[in-house]
Amino acid sequence: MSYHKFNLIDLLKERINMRNKKIVFFTGAGVSAESGISTFRDKDGLWEEYDIKDICTTGCLNTNRNETIEFYNKRRVDLKDKRPNIAHHTIAKLQKQYPDNINIITQNVDDLFEKAECQDVLHLHGFLTEVVCEEEECLYKRDIGYENQKVACPLCGEYIRPNIVFFGEKAPKYWDMYELLSEVDMIIIIGTSGNVINVHHLIEDAKYSILNNLEHSYAIKDDMFDKVIYERATVAIDEIKEIIIKYIKGSENEN
Ligand code: APR
């Protein structure tokens, strides 16, 4: 067999081997913290300032509509000048370099991954720039950018609301998450306290798991992870990137 043919088959094998490696980023508020977006449960986090039950729990639009709408209007308008940080950009670059391997799931409702030109980001808890009609049968949904929302649905006249999943409401994207996580090779969890989604279930089937948080969270048994980095995401992301590239190229045993 000529040298060139051998080389081509080798290359093909390497390509097929690379293509099969499914890598999933699962992120929370911590990945956006260094872009100036408050987390929820850290010191000075959002839940220190607001009571979850008043503005983020099913029924709050009936019992506390004005404050709830105002809370999301404020966060939406504030999002306009927020910029992705190096963690978002590095993940976007990895996804561009390895489009068949890199998947992004986030609990965040901000658009920093999109601003960093990430593709197909799975937002589990909604998307802050979108509003929907409260009338279930009405299909009105609009991305209003960084504006305050209007009051009434232009299609049916009912109230409109932020496209955010409140506690106690259905979160249909969770099914997409579990599907995406089936047969995952590597999962990288960045910036979540694990208080809402049990991250231990997410890493169960992964061949390799990385946790990057600022500090230990009581909701996460970090000894279940293959690698734990307690460091700001913008610093940890470099090491995480190196591990991923080695893994995709098949020299994961060297790390
Ligand atoms: N780099 C890495 N991690 C960070 C950073 C940072 N710069 N800053 C904070 N963190 C970590 C904290 O250590 C903490 O573990 O981010 C996590 C933030 O935890 P939470 O505030 O609980 O946010 P999150 O886990 O995303 O909340 C999940 O709860 O309120 C609901 O719907 C809301 O999606 C949210 C869900």
Image (cartoon, grey):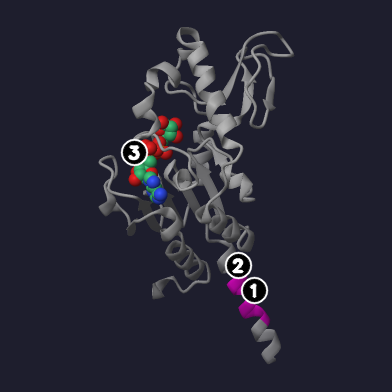
* Residue 177 x/y as whole percent: 50, 40
Q: Residues at badges 3 and 1 in contact (C-beta under 8 Å)?
A: no
Q: Nearer the viewer, mark 2 or mark 3?
A: 3
Q: Bounds of the magenta span?
A: 8-16
Label 3 crowding class (10 Å Cα cut-off): few <14, some 14-19, many 20+?
some
The response on whether ligand 1 sits within 8 Å of label 1 is no
Mark on residue 12? 1
Q: Which residue is mark 3?
A: 42
> Which three-letter amino acid code belongs to the residue tagged 2?
Ile
Residue 106 seen in the current view: yes
Residue at image position (45%, 16%) is 58
> Which three-letter amino acid code belongs to the residue tagged 1?
Leu
Q: Which residue is mark 2?
A: 16
Q: Report the image quarter containing ligand 1.
A: top left
Label 1 SS = helix
Label 3 SS = loop
